[in-house]
Image (cartoon, rainbow, N blue to C red):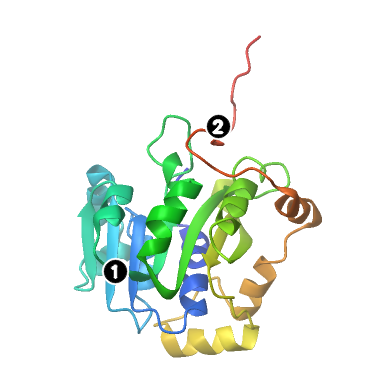
Amino acid sequence: MQSTEADEFIYHESLIHPPLLCHANPKSVFIMGGGEGSAAREILRHKTIQRVVMCDIDQEVVDFCRAYLTVNREAFDSDKLCLIIDDARAELERSQEKFDVIVGDLADPVEGGPCYQLYTKSFYEHIVKPKLNDHGIFVTQAGPAGVLTHKEVFSSIFNTLRHVFKYAQAYTAHVPSFADTWGWVMASDHPFDLVAQQINEKIRCRIEGELAYLSGELLISSTTLNKSVHQSLLNETHVYTEDDARFIYGQGRACCP
């Protein structure tokens, strides 16, 4: 399951609005992946945004979503959106631009898949971080974060990012169509200002229309993890590398003797 019209707003509001609301004045954003257009849609709701670069590797996915997801047509047609069909790692590496926010709206790290190298320490350290402006923020979806699933990749992605950035903030939400709690991680070299009243004021001033899921209070509460997950993140030692990666195998994985 990648996305459903019924509840995709939970995932995309959680992915996009926390880093943009934590930034003082976000003007430019680079999206790695994001082919369905929903991440770009949420970014473009922010009145300060001047430029969004969305780089997805799959032309067929982009074309399908552009044709059939009517809720995202305005975003795809925006003059502020630059759509690139290419490998996000290669595009970001050769880009001469720097961005206020970089978003990892990527597929889960699957063995043999196209995305797992975009969760590694070397990628974060040598490609992502140098392309952030001062006070820039990186955010990535970080996989399942439930009591039984958070050790697959969530804890490792969090630990990897805190080895690259001074500050890493993990947060979670339940996404019904994913049948699990889901995780995201924000990272920056500057601390996050997480005060509910201030976040609500920014939502009122910066964002066009009403958010369906996120509020200042909800954002604060999403950073409070249950004891099992919290302890795992504190104790995690694995750093995600090309030679020592963790993968999501999904439900029904066969284990044959």
Q: Could you tell me residue 78's position as x and y percent?
A: 22, 71
The residues bearing labels 2 and 1 have C-alpha atoms spaced at a distance of: 32 Å
Identify the residue at image location x=62%, y=88%: 197
Q: Is residue 79 above or below residue 12?
A: below
Residue lying at the far top in this picture: please name it: 257
Residue 175 at x, y = what percent? Answer: 58, 55
In which quadrant is the C terminus drawn? top right
Tell me what residue is drawn at x 20 percent, y 68 percent.
Answer: 77
Residue 75 shows in this picture: yes
Residues packed near mark 2 inside 10 Å, few (<14), some (14 to 19) or many (20 plus): few
Residue 249 got which mark? 2
Amino acid, disc 1: Val
User: At x 54% / y 75%, what residue is drawn?
Assistant: 190
Q: Which numbered tag is attached to residue 36?
A: none
- Taking depth in this image into account, of 77 and 171 the one nearest to the observer is 171
User: In the image, is 61 to the left or to the right of 23?
Assistant: left
Choose between 234 and 228: the one closer to the eye.
234
**Residue 212: x %, y % from top left:** 51, 72
Q: Quadrant of residue 126?
A: bottom left
Does 187 appear above or below 202?
above
Query: Which is nearer the N-term, disc 2 or disc 1?
Result: 1
Badge 1 density bin: few <14, some 14–19, many ≥20, Cα 10 Å: many
Question: Which numbered marker is on residue 52?
Answer: 1
| Helix, strand or loop under label 1 | strand
Horizontally, residue 14 falls left or right of residue 236, namely left
Residue 209 position in % (x across, y down): 42, 82
At 66% across and 46% down in the image, what residue appears? 150
Residue 7 appears in view: no
Of 181 and 134, the residue lying toward us = 134
Q: Secondary structure at mark 2?
A: loop
Q: Amino acid at mark 2?
A: Tyr
Q: Is residue 51 left or right of residue 233?
A: left
